[in-house]
Image (cartoon, helix red, strand yellow):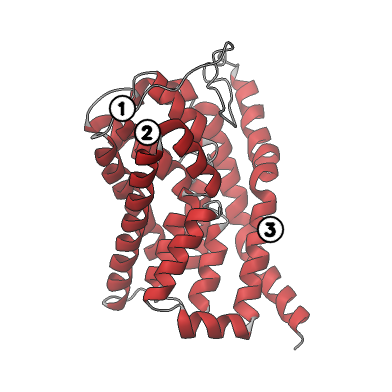
Amino acid sequence: MSFLNQFFQTFFHYAHELWWSLLLGFLLSGIVYEFIPTRVIEKYLSQKGLRPILLTSLIGTALPICCFGTLPVAITLLQKGARLGPVFAFLVTTPATSISALIVCYKLLGIYFTVYIFFAVIIMGLLMGMIGNFFHVPVPAKGEDGQVKGSCCSRDAVSQEKPFNEKIKGALYYAFVTLPKEIGLELLLGVIVASVIVIADPVKAVVSGYLSGALGYFVIIVSGLVTYVCSTASVPLADALLKSGMTAGHVMTFLLVGPITSYGTLLVINKEFGGKILFIYIVCISLLSLLLGILFNWVAVFSLIPS
């Protein structure tokens, strides 16, 4: 069978497996986006103590916001009096996974991966939140229009209450127009790359021969820090890496560090919070992703989880 035939066969297999999961995930994301206003999140997360960190971690796993979209909300939280802890937790848990990502993860990787990453993200958010509470950063400045200077992806956090039917329309529009526009191309590219990885023998040889050990963790962490893949699109890639010879631990590390960080995110953190906070953020994210990945690999080896 030619390479193109293999590619299209694998690509359409992924498409067949994923279409209903993405449809459901987009719909649920639209409902969350429209019916949980940003102002409500800010109200309960601008408090001190462990409670807002836990709440941030739980809410963050469901919110359909990318790592770039979390930045204006996180800075707004600081302006409203939040400590760095809840902000760190929000920056970690919100892009790390989502409703659609969990559904796709269950479909492709199974229940063990899905349950583990759900709790791993919460634990990671809690730990990052507790670390963040030890530090204080200056409140970011606002412009004349009241918006954060230099922020991107901003939207009005205190929009007027809309009628129920308008919320339904807004949820459907976000689910099937806005969200596909934002991550649709990335999802398509993710499936294409995953299909190539699965069928390309040289890629399999490199992965199984050189990236199945400690070097694989290093490559995943470094690439995850400087590139970006959304939580949903990372799942097909993780499935392809698993089929190419990487262990369950490598794949879990990829699912954690890939969506959380990007070069753009790191630049904004450095600009808004300073180099010291950026260094702490990078080190903690890298170590926690590595440790949680190694732990999952250990669980996979001594259980029925496919590794």
Circles 2 and 1: CB atoms closer than 8 Å: yes
Asked if residue 56 lies left or right of residue 96, the reply is: left
* Cα separation between marks 2 and 1: 7 Å
* Cα separation between marks 2 and 3: 31 Å
SS for tag 1? loop
Q: Which residue is mark 3?
A: 188
* Cα separation between marks 3 and 1: 38 Å
Where is residue 182 shown, x and y percent of the image?
66, 43
User: What amino acid does circle 3 point to?
Assistant: Leu
Of callouts 2 and 3, which one flags the residue occurring earlier in the amino acid sequence? 2
Residue sitting at x 26%, y 41%: 131
Q: Quadrant of the N terminus?
A: bottom right
3 or 1: mark nearer the eye = 1
SS for tag 3? helix
Q: Which residue is mark 2?
A: 87
Where is residue 201 shown, x and y percent of the image?
62, 85
Within-10-Å neighbours for mark 2: few <14, some 14–19, many 20+: many
User: What amino acid does circle 1 point to?
Assistant: Arg
Residue sitting at x 41%, y 33%: 273
* Up-down relation of residue 159 to residue 234 (above or below): above
Where is residue 189 shown, x and y percent of the image?
67, 60
Q: Which mark is residue 67?
A: none
2 or 3: mark nearer the eye = 2
